[in-house]
Amino acid sequence: MVSAVTQKEAGRLSEDLAVIAEPHRLLMLRHLRRGPRSAGYLAKALDLPQPLAAYHLSVLLQAGLITKRRNGRFTCYAADHGRVSELHRTMGRLVGVSGAVSEARLAADDPC
């Protein structure tokens, strides 16, 4: 059986993966891992209209994968490295090799 904690983690991971499954958002995160960038920079780098770039940034922001701060008249966006690392660790726990042996023992009654 899957614990309630694991089910909750799987739900959150699924939501996060849905956010970054959109290629523009994934590429934005790739740019933001190197440091803060403006929406204009990201729009130009990804060849997106400014409103579309702003939309994708708002989705990433709402998911908690990026942060924003004002710098004069500009808004600077940055990857939330702690949150992205958490996503990576959770994915490793749920679908990676960690825990595979203990789960295999639990499935000993399965003929496959």
Image (spheres, rainbow, N blue to C red):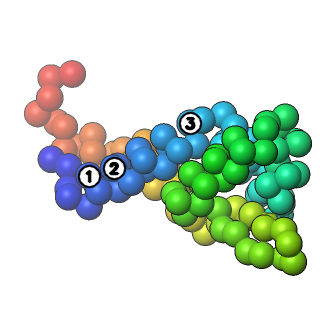
Q: Secondary structure at mark 3?
A: loop
Determine the image quadrant of residue 84.
bottom right
Residue 109 x, y percent position in the rendering? 11, 33
Q: Earlier in the sequence, mark 3 or mark 2?
A: 2
- CB under 8 Å between discs 1 and 2: yes
Residue named by callout 2? 11
Along the line of sight, the residue nearer the viewer: 31 or 103: 31
Q: Residue furthest top?
A: 112
Q: Residue at x 88, y 42 (%)?
A: 44
Residue 90 x, y percent position in the rendering? 46, 55
Task: Tell me the distance, in whole angstroms, between the alpha carbons under discs 3 and 2.
Answer: 15 Å
Residue 66 x, y percent position in the rendering? 64, 62
Q: Residue at x 58, y 43 (%)?
A: 20
Along the line of sight, the residue nearer the viewer: 47 or 22: 47
Task: Tell me the distance, in whole angstroms, between the alpha carbons under discs 3 and 1.
Answer: 20 Å
Q: Residue at x 87, y 77 (%)?
A: 72
Residue 75 x, y percent position in the rendering? 78, 67
Q: Earlier in the sequence, mark 3 or mark 1?
A: 1
Residue named by callout 3? 21
Q: Is residue 26 visible?
A: yes
- The numbered disc on residue 7 is 1
Tell which tag, 3 or 1, sits nearer the viewer: 3
Q: Disc 2 marks which amino acid?
A: Gly
Q: Residue at x 19, y 44 (%)?
A: 106
Q: Secondary structure at mark 1?
A: helix
Along the line of sight, the residue nearer the viewer: 33 or 44: 44
Q: Disc 1 marks which amino acid?
A: Gln
